[in-house]
Amino acid sequence: MSSGIFQFLYFISGMAFFISFSSEKQMARRAALFLSMGTLGGHFAFLFYRSLQAGRPPLTNMFETLHLLAFLIFFLFFVARFRWPIDLVGGFAGLTSALLVASSAIASPEIEPLLPALKSNWLLFHVTACFVAYSSLGLAMGVALAYLATDFLKLGNFSKNVRENFLKKLDRLSHRLILFGYPILTLGIATGSVWAELSWGRYWNWDPKETWAFATWLFYGALLHLRCLKKPRPRLAAVVTVLVFGSVIFTYYGVNFWLSTLHDYA
Amino acid sequence: MPAQKTARVAYAMNVGVRLIAVVILLSSIAVISLLGTFPTEFVPQQVPGAGVANALIRLTRVFGGHALYQTPFFVFLLLCLAASLIEIVVWQLRPFFSRDKIRLRIGSAVNAEVRLETSFEKSHKKILSAGAALHYQPVVPDKDEAFKERIQLIKNSFGVWGPLGVHLGVLLVLLGGLVTFWTAEVKEVEVREGEALYLDHEKMNLTLDKFSVIPYPGKDQTQEYLSRFTSKDEKSQRQHLDLRVNHPLKVGLTKIFQMRYRVEVPRAEVLIYKDGKPLRSVMLEGRKEMKIQDTGLVLGYEKVLPDFRIDKAGNVFSVSPRFVNPAVKLSVNGQPRWIFGELLSKHRSSNDPWDFSIQKLHKVYYSGVRVSRDPGIPFAFFGFGVLVFATFFSSFAIPRVIGVTIRHEHDGQRILLEGLSPRDSAGLEEEIGLLAARLTVKG
């Protein structure tokens, strides 16, 4: 029931930002902002209440992490909006969050007691870091999609100069979001390694989840190196940003479904 | 000058080639490492997408399957990465030993031009104050008249340590991995209750007194796995030690981790019923048939389920490893038959006068522990520490240099702004725009 409400609210918020972007009217912008504030506030209250019920942060199963990820992606957009007020990104963020909340329907919403392997202080650091990183990289992917849509589909009623400036803004935001997510992903991997050493006796097990996280880290490392080239290639960077996010999705979602992993409980 | 320009172009090309090589190396290692995560068993052809899956599985097998990470090829790839990192670290360290410590090597130049209708001195002051407002520090000393018309504004100069730290951190993690690969001693052992585990390096015996699966109060879910050991060292000093998941035991340099457990039921006490009335209790031993006197029965058991359920078809299956609701697969005169704690009518034959129930199961727990002695851990963890710190540093403190040239003209000064940022040219462009805007503001 609650998933349905939040799915609807995120969807409506996303749509409101799309309308705000295309109409460029102050009223539409205000409506989108109020709607998204309400959505975020409600979702935060839901996550907080669930934490109180469970006696732990909502980080231990697919249902909780999907909701957390949806919240973080939209929240991050909301924070980034203060510096980069690009409503088109809000549209993508809203739709992504709605999709994530919708997909939580496949997971059990039951609050189960913690497995012995999850009873560690490292849970909070490792999982939170990973999901903040995923949300940042996810939003960067959304911004890159907005870039490509604006560039190829000529989205928005812009003159050439305005379009170029807008594309520059999108490119910069996408880069900043990756620069924000990358160290946090590193922190997530490092804390996971410390926890793995405590729990499984090896700091690196080449478990599919670890390996996919490692590959994701390398892919984003490659993307950041690509960004250092003398001649900036924002279009290529946007395409790569969208492609490498596939690795994040598989690390989070795919590994648990298709591969045998020590992270089965996640 | 042309020679200098040629040198700069060659340098930029060199940097570009290096970057492309790094991108290819990182992507290759990422893709190849993923091959070790896929299943190695072929998918039946009738399954949708079997063609693609089997092609991937074939490729996975070529690269060694799950054993990929121990293959010389993969180790070679990691060594290539290490070699590349060493080269980059040395290359990045060079400016720290040169006089020009904040020299930025790579990045794209961004230019802007501003006209100021003021005197040279006023323009100079304005540039410094506009730079200061954007947190830029002037590098060229004011007193040096020869350089006064060229000012270098620098921000986050300490940020050059970031990439160096990232590369050094990865290198240290790889070094830790190498030390682990070569020197770590890791073994997994099962210790039976009452048996001892001998730690060679520490000259110590650990006897497993008791293994317990502790449930959450009032629930079926497991709260804790607990192995209670008594240690005895060379001086026969004894100590009680508890081993839990996530709380390894540290004995000298050896660590012991709680991994899994197994239960064996060597004996089962079974109550025999005849025509629904209890007749006799017998003690059966696992996988041994026993002839029961005066009954004509030959009994044995082959399987024990700790927590059974029965589906609609009458099949018995287990739902958890905890001994909550056990079932035993009995062999009665060679015929298999499930028996339970209580008599269950569904599993009784109406013509058969004999019936059975479990009276007691004698369980022996085996605690599965991992014994590890890994000298690579300090290197790897130190590397992770450096890496985490440096990636934050590298991402949030991006060094920027803006070169400002003041050209005196008859109606004022022409200010040329040229910027260089190794990792964020778009951000620098924005800041040059801000600087130019500040310079053009009157006052």
Image: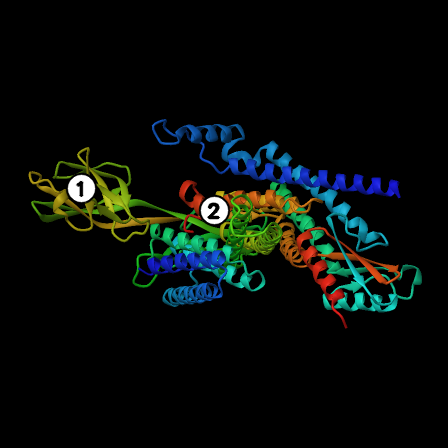
Mark 2: which amino acid?
Ile
Q: Crowdedness of circle 1 by 10 Å Cα count: few (<14), some, many (20+)?
A: few
- Side (left or right) of A252 relative to B251: left
Q: Is residue A116 visible?
A: no
Chain of the residue displaying label 2: A
- Side (left or right) of B237 relative to B211: right
**For mark 1, what is the residue?**
B314
Label 1: which secondary element:
loop
Label 2: which secondary element:
helix
Tell me the quarter of the picture where residue B284 sits: top left
- Side (left or right) of B318 relative to A67: left
Q: CA distance from mark 1 to mark 2?
A: 41 Å
Q: Crowdedness of circle 2 by 10 Å Cα count: few (<14), some, many (20+)?
A: some
The reply to whether discs 1 and 2 touch (Cβ–Cβ < 8 Å) is no
x, y percentage for residue B48? 36, 32
x, y percentage for residue A147? 55, 49
x, y percentage for residue B356? 16, 45
Q: Are discs 1 and 2 located on one and the same chain?
A: no
**Disc sitting over residue A249 in the figure:** 2
x, y percentage for residue A185? 56, 53
Residue name at image x 56 percent, y 43 percent: A239
Q: Nearer the viewer, residue A122 or A166?
A: A166
- Name above or below for residue A86 compared with residue B308: below
